Image: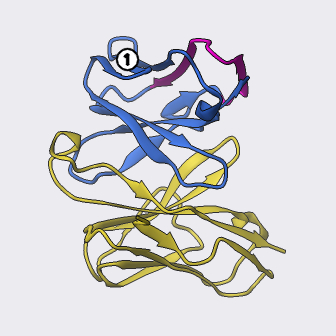
Amino acid sequence: DVKVTQSSRYLVKRTGEKVFLECVQDMDHENMFWYRQDPGLGLRLIYFSYDVKMKEKGDIPEGYSVSREKKERFSLILESASTNQTSMYLCASSLPGQGLLSGANVLTFGAGSRLTVL
Amino acid sequence: QKEVEQDPGPLSVPEGAIVSLNCTYSNSAFQYFMWYRQYSRKGPELLMYTYSSGNKEDGRFTAQVDKSSKYISLFIRDSQPSDSATYLCAMSLMDGTDKLIFGTGTRLQVFP
């Protein structure tokens, strides 16, 4: 029944390391998103993608990059991890369309990846 | 000022109580309003959504939107311990991007 899978639930990395967070969805959704969730700040959009090899910056893209080589997989990359990137990272996917009335615009989230950068 | 404001709580109520969760927003262009529920160590899941103003009821849950006041609410009747979770409001411009703006979430604890 699992629809959006984030491969790593808990990671601990050191400052300066390169970090890959993987997300796979099995619902054939075109849209995929990466959010980070922090206490008092809620969910903030990092990057999103509407199609294979396509990406767009969200509200807080600095320090992150993404890759979408296949429709079902959307990877978040921290080129050089820093302590302020310690957070819960949530991947989501959705169908495009005319909005909720058509069944679109409903984000299905993964369980999250909690990253600690020391 | 944040686009969406939500009281973080925590809100602690006895089983059976009526719970009211609220969000205010500043962008009058928002068209879709959603409530997501997030259990501990899980990702958020869509609970309810409404389009424009009005009420929507689903079992013990009622979502209300007042666009003139830029205020949305989620009411939970006969609250249960299983309702204990963080509730996030979310809004969308419906500009074809599927981008959602989330509130910070309200943590709810329903005790037996």
Q: Is residue A57 above or below residue A76?
A: above
Camera-side residue: A74 or A16?
A74
The residue segment tinted magenta is B8-25
Identified at 50% across, 32% down, the residue is: B4
For the residue marked with disc 1, what is the amino acid?
Answer: Gln
Identified at 25% across, 24% down, the residue is: B52
Q: Quadrant of the N terminus of chain A?
A: bottom left
The colour of chain A is yellow
Tell me where residue B47 sits by quadrant.
top left
Residue B12 within the magenta-colored segment of the rendering: yes
Identified at 56% across, 68% down, the residue is: A62
Residue beneath disc 1: B64
Q: Is residue A39 above or below residue A35?
A: above
Residue found at the far front of this picture:
B112
- Secondary structure beneath dot 1 equals strand
Q: Position of residue B42 (x, y in %)?
A: 59, 54
Q: Chain of mark 1?
A: B
- For residue B19, say whether it is visible: yes
Identified at 73% across, 65% down, the residue is: A86
Q: Is residue B43 above or below residue A77?
A: above
Q: Is residue B27 above or below residue B65?
A: below
Residue neighbourhood size for the residue with mark 1, other residues' Cα within 10 Å, grouped as few (<14), some (14–19), many (≥20): many
For the stretch drawn in magenta, the main secondary structure is strand
Q: Position of residue B64 (x, y in %)?
A: 37, 17
Residue B24 within the magenta-colored segment of the rendering: yes
Chain painted blue? B
* Colour scheme employed for the rendering of this structure: by chain
Tell me where residue A116 sits by quadrant.
bottom right
Tell me where residue A72 sits by quadrant.
bottom left
